[in-house]
Amino acid sequence: MSFASLGLSDDIVRAVTELGYTEPTPIQTQAIPVVLSGRDLMGGAQTGTGKTAGFTLPILQRLSDRSVKGPSTGRPPVRALVLTPTRELAAQVEESVRNYGKYLKLTSMTMFGGVSINPQIKQLRSRVDILVATPGRLLDHIQQGTLDLSQVEILVLDEADRMLDMGFIRDIKKILALLPKDRQNLLFSATFSDEIKLLADSLLKSPELIEVARRNAAAETISQKIHPVDRDQKRQLLAHLIKQNNWFQVLVFTRTKHGANRLAEQLDKDGISALAIHGNKSQGARTRALAEFKEGTLQVLVATDIAARGIDIDQLPHVVNYELPNVPEDYVHRIGRTGRAGAVGEAVSLVCVDEKKLLADIERVMKRQIPSEVVPGFEPDPNAKPEPIQQRSGGGGGRQGQGRGAPRSGSSGAGAGQGGRTQSRQPAAQAGNHNSRSPAGGRRPTGRHH
């Protein structure tokens, strides 16, 4: 199967080929013909399967094949709208659009908060065919009268599960009310919760359902392991594992921004180069940390869940859950940073007595038991008593120019992170150092997409 055989134009196939990709992934093989046909689509795919190209390539094809609908007066119309939960993902999706559409006469832009709105207003005065945006900043533009969505032909909700986790449902409903009823709708989600199904039922018209992996499943190329350990020995065990196994490019997850900062500082003192990224870090600090991590000069990157959305690194070998997530589905997203595009990856979780219920929830959702191995010298105290778990403090954090709603139940309160518009304006990385998004997200079309 080739990209040309899926019905894509020579100009699109040329751009894809120049990026080094020749064969579509399963999600692309199934999704591209559906999107090209104009049908609504509900797509389920685990991270790293090439999902983004599954909708960007056919959208480029459809828009380039058709002229603008209806008379255009004043500001040129936005023809396709892609909503994403985080600014990093928005930047990466829009870069995909630019890379794949380099030989087409279509324009695109990103729109998110945490940065000045004025350059975005200026850009909207020119033609924008494809807009990739986070919900909160999009509604800011609507309120200021700088954006017209009345001629949108295609709507994409990307990472819909994360958007609901972050409390965006009210924003999404407001945006849907501004769109023309006659449009194509595409919804992509790594997991299909009851809330996602309800949203899909209200949004999609006789959709085609595509699932390329069992729901809430991790890639088979990821080796998963649990290391039981006392809570006050986690940092020492992590340092031991990194040094003993000579690990480099280790992505470590914590629940809170404060915890990420503290762990990065402690690892540095242990002689392991580490930096933290989260919403309270400046845009420059996040950009530098990501750049150093991708280049391999930074050994450990400590991240919160939301901040890690959009981290897309070739051959990332190690993911460590320093603390298990409060939401079981987040475990799948976390470990999906490794084992991408068929590469082998390793996911290790350090689990203390406080987290036994969280581990049970994860194994129930994944429908499998994760192998457990006690590391000699770090045997947990069998008489240790569990203590209450601190709730995550905003994940990717900051206002991020997104979201108005409170997080849905089950998303751990403030863990909605970027969902709350009452939070302070905190700049975050625009993913300026992210890799080019390819059909598979960066190498060959076997994945790196969310």
Image: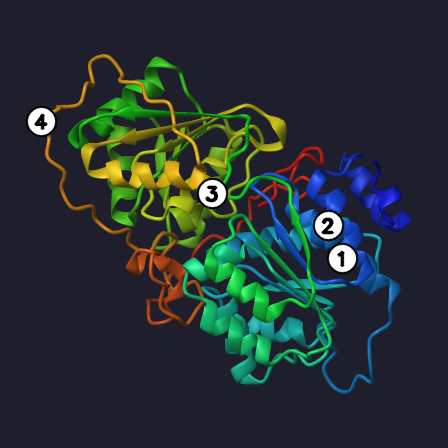
CA separation in Å, label 4 and label 1:
57 Å
CA separation in Å, label 2 and label 4:
52 Å
CA separation in Å, label 3 and label 2:
21 Å
Residue for badge 4: 383
Q: Is residue 106 above or below residue 320?
A: below
Residue for badge 1: 35
Q: Residues within 10 Å of mark 2 (few under 14, many from 20)?
A: many
Residue 218 left/right relative to 421: right
Earlier in the chain: of badge 2 and badge 4, it is: 2
* Residue at horizontal 33 percent and vertical 26 percent from the top: 226
Residue 122 left/right relative to 4: left
Quarter of the N terminus within the rendering:
top right
Earlier in the chain: of badge 4 and badge 1, it is: 1
Tell me the kind of residue under disc 1.
Val
Asked if disc 3 and disc 2 are in contact, CB closer than 8 Å, the reply is no
Nearer to us: label 4 or label 3: 4
Can residue 324 be seen here? The reply is no
Q: Residues within 10 Å of mark 3 (few under 14, many from 20)?
A: many
User: Disc 1 on helix, strand or loop?
Assistant: helix
Q: Position of residue 174 (x, y in %)?
A: 52, 78
- For the residue pair 324 and 443, the one nearer the viewer reads as 324
Can residue 199 be seen here? The reply is yes
Tell me the kind of residue under disc 4.
Asn
User: Disc 3 on helix, strand or loop?
Assistant: helix
Residue for badge 3: 333
Q: Position of residue 50 (x, y in %)?
A: 66, 42
